[in-house]
Amino acid sequence: MGKDVSLQTFSRQEREHYRQKVRRCLDVFALMLNDFSFDADHPTTGLEIELNLVDAEHLPTMVNEEVLRDLADPQFQTELGRFNLELNVPPRLISGDGLVQYEQQIIESLRRADAHARKHDAALLTIGILPTLTTDHTVTENLSVNGRYRSLNEEILAARGEQIGVDIRGADRLRIRTDSIAPEAACTSLQFHLQVSPAEFAAYWNASQVIAGVQVAVGANSPYLFGHQLWSETRIALFEQATDTRPDELKAQGVRPRVWFGERWVTSIFDLFEENVRYFPPLLPIAEEEDPLTVLRDGGVPRLGELRLHNGTVYRWNRPVYDIMGGRPHLRVENRVLPAGPTVVDMLANGALYFGLVRALVEEDRPLWTQLPFSVAQDNFHAAARRGIVAPVWWPRLGEIRVTDLVLEMLLPRAAEGLDRFGVDPAHRDRLLGIIEQRCVTGQNGSTWQVATVRALEAAGATRPAALRAMVGRYAEHQRTNEPVHTWPVG
């Protein structure tokens, strides 16, 4: 959400004032889009990686505050759970060896953070959902001490008016009810940022929506939750349910969920911000003193703080971002569909596929989203989350096709073209896209490796909890090698 807040309750007057400020920000944003100069000269990319802290038994350990205090690195921040951290990698261009520089920088940042975690008998793990988590770990007491998480928890529960239910059916079925949003802390993701111009934003957002299912299928890494084998990318279902502010009656009325794929292709970034304001009541009504219209009229750059904070509480899988860097405003697509892990090089391969594909699709003569109903893109997304790398998806001019065949036959060449247009060095392009290719050839990504390893351990006599702990131990060992997951042995 990009903002620290203290734990507090909000008065009716504060809520009314905040709603007015959000609408005023939206009006000013519309003016800016018409005739303001946004920074788009050298579009940069960015990465965020959410992390788990585990102890010697590969169980979550609640020491993020202590690790952050010792680390004293502004690139690392708290996340929802006390067993979570977040790494914000400084933005850069991906031309030339930019992707390799990302890889080296992330490896070094994680190495340094892990060294500090060791002082607290902890280690870092990048994985979509930590398989050794239990419901005893995801309780209100284990939310990070940052007041924004406690306030968000109270506001979501107040809006819902009842306990939060999680009901996910996969190979097993999980049904729980909880008095907090703490189960959402199980979800640790990899987020890509791509800076774009106002004129290009809609095309990049639409392209990101088109390929979301493909990304999830090949990058799935979250098959287990609370000891149950569920979806290939269970993180999708858990995130959608664990932060749902709607009781059953509002769901039946068609009220939009706050974790949202969306409902239509857009023609401007304004469409998304306007939907946020029209459909979603504020959760954290914290107003700033700035009058954005006065700032704009005086030749300044409005912060639009209320609009940005509100945007941070609407959890789109591809989120619009307005931000200011070096005194100039810019726009970004924040791609939030992927889990963290398994290795740094796997995450950079996922990044190469995303950046390359969206660039290629945006520059096509006939955009794919004009040939694909929005509801089908959403169906592809959820089918991929359920079935992972073996999922079938529907694609224009091809009909139903297995996602691995689609990637190998059609999308990898397009991703290579897109990376070429970004100016990525061909050797680095081929290395990273080659990892995606081999995942599709072998059928092994993080999710399938986890499931195969647990099944092998259970076949040898291990109980499910013991198998999960042993699997996470092997996962951690492989992760440290930075060898891509398709090369990891099972057994």
Image (cartoon, helix red, strand yellow):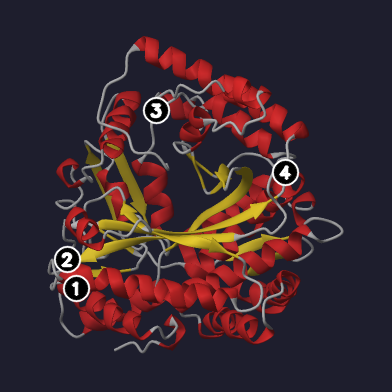
N-term mark: 3 or 1: 3
Q: Residue at x 48, y 61 (%)?
A: 90
N-term mark: 3 or 2: 2
Q: Is residue 204 above or below residue 437?
A: above
Disc 4 crowd rating (10 Å Cα; few below 14, some 14-19, many 20+) is many
* Callout 1: SS: helix
Horizontal arrangement in the rendering, residue 375 relative to residue 247 (left or right) = right
Q: Amino acid at mark 2?
A: Leu
Any mark on residue 113, and which? none
Q: Residue at x 40, y 83 (%)?
A: 482
Pointer 1 with pointer 2, Cβ within 8 A: yes
Pointer 3 with pointer 2, Cβ within 8 A: no
* Callout 4: SS: helix
Pointer 3 with pointer 1, Cβ within 8 A: no
N-term mark: 2 or 4: 2
Horizontal arrangement in the rendering, residue 402 relative to residue 170 (left or right) = right
- The location of residue 288, given as percent across then percent down, is 44, 24
Q: Amino acid at mark 1?
A: Arg
Task: Give the residue number, with chain letter if any, for mark 1.
Answer: 469
Any mark on residue 283, and which? 3
Q: Nearer the viewer, residue 19 or 105?
A: 105
* Callout 3: SS: loop
Any mark on residue 198, and which? 4
N-term mark: 1 or 4: 4
Disc 2 crowd rating (10 Å Cα; few below 14, some 14-19, many 20+) is many
CA gap between label 2 and label 4 equals: 45 Å
Q: Amino acid at mark 4?
A: Pro
Task: Give the residue number, with chain letter if any, for mark 2.
Answer: 59
